[in-house]
Amino acid sequence: MASSSSTLSISSSSTLVDTKAPRHSAASSPQCVTLPTLPPPPVQSQNRPGKTTAYCRKIARNVMAMATGEAPAEVATTEFPEIVKTVQEAWEKVEDKYAVSSLAVAGAVALWGSTGLISAIDRLPLVPGVLELVGIGYTGWFAYKNLVFKPDR
């Protein structure tokens, strides 16, 4: 009987159930448990709209100033720090910008690769301890050779 029709199936209680029949609601079934509903979303604080409104007014002033051809007050008074000016002047003096840019990228890649290599070495079981002992030994030798005796200081 179960193999002749696809509309019947056997449930865990060994009774035949018609799968195309309408199901009962979860609230009326004694075996089903429903989850509680979520609370409504919290109301936004009252001080937030004031900040948003002030920000929108500032943007509107900037848009109006740009439309009339004037520069906004914030843009007109903005100055770069001294280091930025120095870097810009140094960049203007460079003749081969492609080579300098290539060296900068190669340096960044080398730095990234060396950090990967050091972290790989650090994960080896005995190497960090041995390197620490080498560092302590070299520090002791340097202090003995250059700092202990008065004429060498």
Image (tube, rainbow, N blue to C red):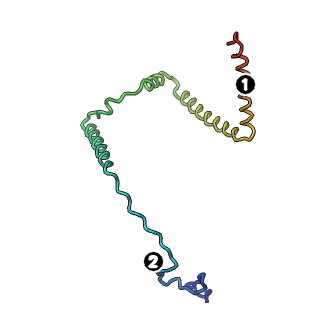
Image quadrant holding the N terminus, namely bottom right
Report the side of 16 relative to 153 (left or right).
left
Quarter-wise, where is residue 127 in the image? top right
Report the side of 140 relative to 13 (left or right).
right
Q: Position of residue 8 (x, y in %)?
A: 57, 85
Q: Nearer the viewer, residue 140 or 79?
A: 140
- Of helix, strand and loop, which one carries label 1? helix
Report the residue at 24% width, 37% height from top.
68
Question: Badge 1 is on which residue?
Answer: 138
Quarter-wise, where is residue 28 in the image? bottom left
The disc label shown at residue 27, or none: 2
Report the residue at 42% width, 64% height from top.
38
Q: Position of residue 149 (x, y in %)?
A: 71, 13
Report the residue at 53% width, 82% height from top.
19
Q: Residue furthest top?
A: 151
Q: Position of residue 121 (x, y in %)?
A: 70, 38
Q: Is residue 41 above or below residue 136?
A: below
C-alpha span from label 1 to label 2: 77 Å
Which comes sooner in the sequence, label 1 or label 2? 2
Image quadrant holding the C terminus, namely top right
Q: Position of residue 42 (x, y in %)?
A: 37, 57
